[in-house]
Amino acid sequence: MELSIIITSYKSPELLKVCIDSIKKNYSGSDYEIVVSDSETTEEISTMMREDYSEIKFLSSEINLWFGGEVRRGYKESTGDFILILNDDIIIKENSIEKLLEYMKNNQEVGVVGPQLLNFNDSIQTSCFRFMTPLTILYRRTPLGKLWFAKKYLEYYLMKDVDNNKIQEVDWILGSAMMTRRAIADVVGLIDKRFTYYFEDIDWCRNFWENGYKVIYYPIAKMYHYHRRSSAGKNIFKLLFFNKLSRIHIASAIKYFWKYRGKPLPKHN
């Protein structure tokens, strides 16, 4: 099979339906499969998948597998030579999958490629980044981020100094929508099990770079992204006491920086 589309899903039947329907409507390929990897599966989603999408491979779970666990499970149950990973809050635009697939086929040195993500008013979301440092976390989640030097630092992290309509090598792309090749992913390895929430995509992209494969931001392909956010941009001290997801997020950050302690960042153009 040419392509496997793995959709990671969590308690959002409406979003999942729109995502699936956008693929069926806007992807012209025939040699593909859709694998839905769902966490804490509800009866509503089970019924919808059974009655409306019986042809789709549906993987349910009573527990939350988080993004990395959903991707690993979906990957193992898929068969395609190319793998497109989507969150359930992605809406496919016409020809977007075809463009990603064509680019991967024509560029053997590319390990991961991601589309340009759009808000529903067609404004561009930031979906490619430079690698994080501990300062990135500090400035994003404390009042220090309001200082001029911190703002400049964060603008660099968010790649505000580059043209976001240009095809380019980037440190990492958002895991909400990314395509890879099975033969490469088998060499690089799947998403690290150590990361429960956040840093999975950063770490995975870094693994591709360290194994000699490029990570590419490809704005020729465009997709809509609802972009649910549960903790970003809030004060770290409040979050540590009141927000479970943010505590997990901070724990993932510690694991990430500990994993790469003393190692230089991968170099590329």
Image (cartoon, rainbow, N blue to C red):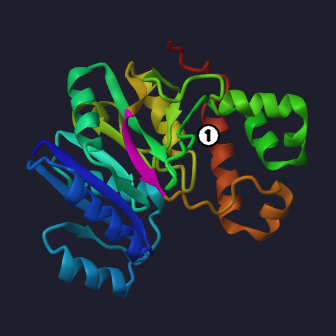
The amino acid type of the residue labelled 1 equals Tyr
| Residue 84 image position (x, y, % from top left) | 30, 46
* Residue sitting at x 88%, y 41%: 146
Quarter holding residue 236: bottom right
Q: Quadrant of the N terminus?
A: top left
Secondary element under disc 1, as helix, strand or loop, is helix
Q: Position of residue 237 (x, y in %)?
A: 85, 58
Q: Main secondary structure of the magenta part?
A: strand
Q: Is residue 148 left or right of 107 when viewed as pictured?
A: right
Q: Position of residue 252 (x, y in %)?
A: 63, 49
Picture layout, residue 12 above or below residue 181: below
User: Which residue in the rendered view is the most extreme toward the front?
Assistant: 121
Any part of residue 258 in sight: yes
User: In the rendered view, would you say 187 is above or below 123?
Assistant: above
Residue 38 sits in quarter: bottom left
Residue range in magenta is: 220-225
Please tell me which residue lies in front, 116 or 133.
Answer: 116
- Of residues 210 and 143, the one drawn nearer to the viewer in this rendering: 143
Residue 71 seen in render: no
Q: Is residue 76 magenta?
A: no
Identify which residue, 126 or 188, lies in the foreground.
126
Q: Residue at x 50, y 14 (%)?
A: 268
Image quarter of residue 74: bottom left
In magenta stretch: residue 221: yes
For label 1, count other residues whose C-alpha is less than 10 Å away and answer few (under 14), some (14-19) or many (20+).
many
Q: Residue at point 54% right, 50% down?
A: 195
- Name the residue carrying label 1: 256
Image location (x, y in percent) of residue 266: 54, 19
- What's the residue at 46%, 57% (across, down)? 67
Q: Nearer the viewer, residue 25 or 83?
A: 25
Q: Looking at the image, how many numbered discs can be counted on the residues? A: 1
